[in-house]
Image (cartoon, grey):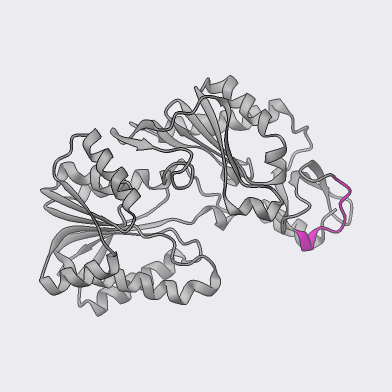
Amino acid sequence: MITSRGSERLRAGHLWVYRSDVRSASSEAGSIVRLTDERGRYHGRAFYSDKSQIAVRLLTREDVPVDRAFLTERIRRAAAYRKTVVENTETYRLIYGEADLLPSLIVDRYSDYFVVQTLSQSTDRIKSLFCEILVDLFSPKGVLERNDPKVRLLEGLEQRVGVIYGEIPDEVVAKENGIAFVYDLRKGQKTGSFLDQRENHWAARRYASGEALDCFSYQGGFSLTIAGKCNHVEGVDMAPAALESARRNQKLNAISNVTFREANTFDLLKEYDELGRRFDMIVLDPPAFAKNRDSIPAAQRGYKEINLRAMKLLKPGGYLVTCSCSYHISEALFLQILAESANDARKTISVVERRTQSQDHPILLTMPETHYLKCMIVKVLE
């Protein structure tokens, strides 16, 4: 039973009810429950956790059984949508949790291999069923559970990584936007890589030319995608392992006009300004600077510094592709930071595109938590 505040939250379109709004619960941890409020009104069927502050995750507002057929249809619908939005790509997000009405379930596809994350007690409890459905529908060569996110600890679940079907090789080669990348599904970031930037990689290519600088380049997603439109691209990252992967991907695609180097982006941008270096495009794709609300002020300063310095390095007519994956930095705040950066850099800029995460990471309108990535493409006018 949930409180009136919990039921109002569901009626507003959110899928979560917090523990403070659960009046009573007699269900087992990880079970699928029938939701009613204090007046006995029915609100749907949901996943239930007895540990997390997110106690309830709504599955359906209909009074129907949540069984194999129900889950199969949800997965089938998610896959059908990807067919409409994923092109020239073998690696993408097949299921994005709440946004696909399968709360706390992540499934990423890397060519013939699938990576699954079951991030709540409920999805973890029926993990084998999800795996069976995926095998029945898609016949993958292997399914890996990449259940090492710390959020599982909030559910009282252990962190683990292991093969749950077939075989998973040490490395998988799959194409994104027609470019081949090597993925380590067991140890790579997220489930192997950052799949949410795929469309932004291709969008940046549209404006790329001349000399380009790709900061926080990781495995070279932006660098290698825009290389075909540039004279030269310099990719920068602090992590030697990431640079090694980027160079391998470069060699795999026989791309000769990209140079990867190890450096701190903040220091490098300052150094290049002092040297008078200028670029036709700069890409900023940093890690999340704001992990929580308390870190927003420090994050603002960090975003402003790198964007201000990047704007100084751009030629008139040059493009800045700048990103924030911090959920706590809203699009409005990010645009404000860019405006302040442009003013301090004495640059006049126009916003060419306001972008977000790739369409295989859909945004549930009534659930802001599903919208986290901001990507702005701006042009320096003078």
Percent of width and height locating residue 165: 58, 25
Percent of width and height locating residue 107: 54, 37
- In the displayed structure, would residue 180 be above or below residue 215? above
Left or right: 270 in relation to 197: left
User: Can residue 348 be spotted in the picture?
Assistant: no
Percent of width and height locating residue 144: 54, 33
Q: Residue furthest bottom?
A: 344
- In the displayed structure, would residue 180 be above or below residue 373? above
Left or right: 289 in relation to 79: left
Percent of width and height locating residue 333: 43, 70
User: Is 163 included in the stretch rendered in magenta?
Assistant: no
Left or right: 78 in relation to 277: right
Hey, which quadrant is residue 145 in on the image?
Answer: top right
Question: The magenta stretch spans which residues?
Answer: 19-27
- In the displayed structure, would residue 64 be above or below residue 245? above
Left or right: 68 in relation to 145: right
Marker count (numbered) = 0
Tell me which residue sits at (79%, 41%) in the image.
31
What quarter of the picture does the C terminus occupy? bottom left
User: Can residue 295 be spotted in the picture?
Assistant: yes
Tell me which residue sits at (79%, 37%) in the image.
63
User: Is 24 included in the stretch rendered in magenta?
Assistant: yes
